[in-house]
Image: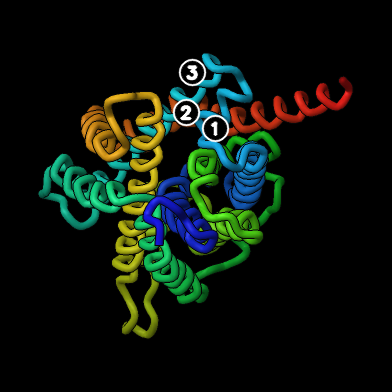
Amino acid sequence: MNDNVLTYKQLFWLFLSMQVIMNMLLTPSGSIMVAQQDAWLSALIAILISLLTLWTSIKVCTRYPSMDFHVIIETIAGKWIGRILSIFLLISFTIVLAVMLRQYGEFVSGTVLPNTPISVIIFCILVTAIYPTFHGLGVIGRLAEIFGPILLLGIISPILLGIVNMDVKHLLPFWYDSGILAIITGSLGPAAFLTDCVLILWIFNLSEFHPNKIKYLVWGIITSGLLYLLSVTSIIATFGVKIASTHLYPFLILERYISIFGMIENLDAIVITVWILSIFLKICLYLFVTSYGFSMYTAKINRHKMVFYIAGIAFFLSLLPRNVVDISIEFPQVVGIPFILPFWVILPLFLSLTIFIKDKINKTQ
């Protein structure tokens, strides 16, 4: 098997695995705080935003199926504008990679390794992620095929076991207490995670040609979004709005709350395990895309060497935030939602519209 090519099934497992659990752990409390019991509607809007981003990204890639993205964007937008937009996109991926590393460090430090320096925790997972990234996209895809079913089982099983603690009355009244503006605002946090499907711009043409490739990819994003929707609904139905919005990791608290006849307890250990597997895949994919992308603009540094440069930069950036508040609250509000999210949504939309307009002009000539 080619270590630089993804299969269509690996695309499904990769995007499902890397998106779902980080979204479920990090965004529900903020969404519930804003949209209250209608946070599940915010989840639906986030899914729609991510599907728009995915659809426009696929349109761009399928229009030029034999090209790398750095060539595609320069063909569509012109050499210099295209290059600037491409580099900005890669910079945004690098920043998000650093944020993920810090969030991983804060989470592990706060749950299982409280006495271990965060820098050590981040360094360990980053060094581990370098190995599959160095060996190619196909290796990351095969890891996703292995981890994906484990992640799916580790997410669905605890939710099903917690049904006995849920009360659908906590989901009422519908719409009355929030309104459309609050619901849309509450969707921005989860949308910021789901729209990283924009990564497909760099790897779609590196995956094998198959008639089911797009279908599997779309279902990967939809499944990820629906699992997030299920988790938000479960959190609200179990705790209500007031309690759910006050915890940084409400899904983790949901699993700790489960007790079946006093025999099945402490399921938060399962969530921590699948979260680590998920973020490991996510770090690997971001590290591959950024190293592969930046290597296209350097004559002397190939992708393999670039992996180490990007890893070093991301490690340094991950240590800049002062605490968990900076990385989990301040960054999304100041940088993630106002700048990175719109850029990820608008860029493929702009490229697909430019292609559409150019095609119309060519037909009229």
Pick whichever, 332 or 206, lies toward us.
206
Mark 3 or mark 1, which has the lower sequence index? 3
Q: In which quarter of the image is residue 254?
A: bottom left
Work out whether 122 lies above or below 316: below
In the rendered image, which residue does mark 3 sit on?
Answer: 84
Q: In the rendered view of the protein, which quadrant contains the N terminus? A: bottom left
Q: Place residue 322 in its image quadrant.
A: top left
Which of label 2 and label 1 is nearer to you?
Answer: 2
Residue 184 locus on image (x, y percent): 64, 38
Q: Residues within 10 Å of mark 3 (few under 14, many from 20)?
A: some
Q: Do the residues labelled 2 and 1 touch (CB within 8 Å)?
A: yes
Residue identified by numbered label 1: 344
Q: Where is residue 67 in the image (x, y as percent from the top left)?
A: 55, 37
Residue 343, visible in the rendered structure: yes
Task: Residue at 46%, 50% (x, y): give it.
Answer: 23
Q: Residue at left 32%, top 53%?
A: 280
Mark 2 lies on residue: 89
SS of the residue under disc 3: helix
Circle 2 packing at 10 Å, graded few (<14), some (14-19), many (20+), is some
Q: Give the Cα separation between the discs numbered 3 and 1.
A: 14 Å
Distance Cα–Cα, label 2 vs label 3? 9 Å
Residue 269 drawn at (x, y percent): 29, 67
Picture layout, residue 67 above or below residue 158 = above
Q: CB of mark 3 within 8 Å of CB of mark 1?
A: no
What amino acid is found at the position of numbered circle 3 in the picture? Ile
